[in-house]
Amino acid sequence: MKTESDRKNHADSNSCSLRPRAPLWAKLVATFFGTGLLRPGPGSWGSAATVLLWWLLSRWIAVEWQPYAAALMAAVTALVGIPAATLVARAARLKDPQFVVIDEVAGQLITLIAVPVLWKSLLLGFILFRGFDIVKPPPVRWLEHLPEGFGIVIDDVGAGLYALAIMQLALHYGVLPR
């Protein structure tokens, strides 16, 4: 007959086989407050939420400070997103879970650095970033092979840099209004 102590020891030994749980802060950050749980296309939802958030926040930031604010937000997002993505990916036992969208947030913010906050610019930035994130031209594809959260986030940083370059060319050549 099993005693209470035997049952407790059995439960303790079974708990070791359970996968680790990501802390709440990591889940909230990695999924961008649940945006990554939306379907279909959680990455697109994460990017769209970022564009909307940037449009709202930019109303309270002087135009001359907006490039610095976008760059700072992108850097902080990437730096906080890497450990959050690592913890959530480990808990899910997936290399790059689709519901982790903090990488899209960082990449989308990079795309919008020094870009006027006008609907045409925001739309083109969204389309370009999503396109580069999906296609992953070299070396972006190679970056996703880096370990854990770093690989999850850094490939989207690369896609954001590609999109930023095209956005700046479009502004320089007058395709987009300044």
Image: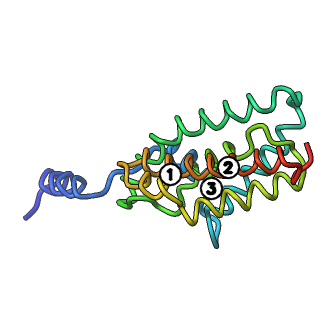
Specify the label residue 169 is tagged with: none
Residue underneath mark 1: 155
Say whether disc 2 or disc 3 marks the residue closer to the N-terminus: 3
Q: Of 154 and 90, which appears nearest the observer?
A: 154
Residue ID at (73%, 54%)? 49
Q: Distance between the residues labelled 1 and 2?
A: 12 Å
Q: Is mark 3 on a helix, strand or loop?
A: loop
Residue ID at (28%, 58%)? 18
Quarter occupied by the C terminus: top right
Q: Which amino acid does label 3 sit on?
A: Gly
Residue underneath mark 2: 108
Specify the label residue 34 is tagged with: 3
Residue ID at (45%, 44%)? 23
Q: Is mark 2 on a helix, strand or loop?
A: helix
Q: As drawn, is 76 to the left or to the right of 85?
A: right
Q: How far apart are marks 3 and 1 (CA)?
A: 21 Å
Report x, y in % for residue 123.
81, 58
